[in-house]
């Protein structure tokens, strides 16, 4: 279902955003990864459990160099992005990594992800190298990243998600 969006604003996430982030996180996974990640795993995702994790994460602070922004339509969280220092073994000092970027599926195609990506790029700097990992079978996300200047850089890995070994591809910008 496509939702009607009020004007979307982006700001730094606070502990009070945990429930909205968790809802978006779970809904996005269930929609985006259907047919990629095992159905039983997707069905087991629990927004309440995820909310507790997000609340702790946002309250305790992930560190000075890790930032989460939320996209709001009115007062409702419709997307979020988290960025920090690259965790890759071959990362250079100053490289950044997008750890997560998720949207409420009803908002896909409305420019919310574009606005979140522009926020990240503006915050870290146009010339800063940014990497991210994406499931190889998630063609929608791969297309989005390519439109924003990211390219697969040839590095791949397998990740166990819900009992399945799934191929992830690293994308790089800058």
Image (cartoon, helix red, strand yellow):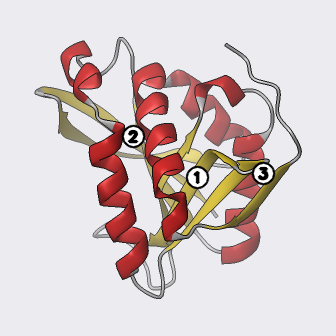
Asked if labels 3 and 2 touch by Cβ distance under 8 angstroms, the answer is no
Question: What residue is shown at x 71% (from left), y 75% (from top)?
Answer: 123
Say which element carries label 3.
helix
Which mark is drawn over residue 115? 3
Which mark is drawn over residue 80? 1
Whole-percent x, y for residue 166 in the image? 24, 29
Mark 1 Cα within 10 Å, few/some/many (few <14, many 20+)? many
1 or 2: tag closer to the N-terminus:
1
In this picture, is 30 found above or below 100? above
Whole-percent x, y for residue 142 in the image? 56, 33
Disc 2 vs disc 3: which is toward the camera?
Answer: 3
Counting labels gives 3
Task: From the image, tell me which residue sits under label 2.
Answer: 169
Q: Nearer the viewer, residue 90 or 161?
A: 161
Disc 1 vs disc 2: which is toward the camera?
Answer: 1
89 lies left or right of 107: left
2 or 3: tag closer to the N-terminus:
3
Say which element carries label 1.
strand
Q: Quadrant of the C terminus?
A: bottom right
94 lies left or right of 136: right
Question: What residue is shown at x 51% (from left), y 62% (from top)?
Answer: 82
Mark 2 Cα within 10 Å, few/some/many (few <14, many 20+)? many
């Amino acid at each position: 279902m496509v939702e009607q969006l009020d004007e979307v604003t982006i700001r730094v996430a606070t502990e009070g955003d945990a429930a909205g982030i968790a809802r978006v996180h779970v809904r996005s996974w269930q929609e985006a990864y259907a047919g990629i990640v095992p159905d039983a795993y997707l069905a087991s995702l629990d927004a309440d459990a995820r909310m507790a994790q997000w609340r702790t994460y946002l309250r305790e602070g992930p560190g000075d160099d890790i930032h989460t922004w939320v996209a709001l339509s009115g007062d409702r969280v419709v997307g979020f992005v988290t960025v920090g220092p690259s965790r890759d073994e071959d990362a250079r000092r100053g490289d950044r990594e997008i750890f997560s970027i998720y949207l409420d599926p009803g908002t896909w195609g409305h420019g919310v992800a574009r606005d979140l990506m522009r926020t990240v790029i503006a915050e870290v700097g146009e010339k800063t190298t940014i990497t991210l990992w994406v499931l190889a079978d998630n063609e929608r996300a791969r297309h989005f990243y390519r439109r924003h200047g990211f390219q697969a850089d040839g590095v791949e890995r397998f990740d166990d998600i819900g009992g399945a070994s799934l191929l992830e591809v690293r994308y790089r910008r800058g």
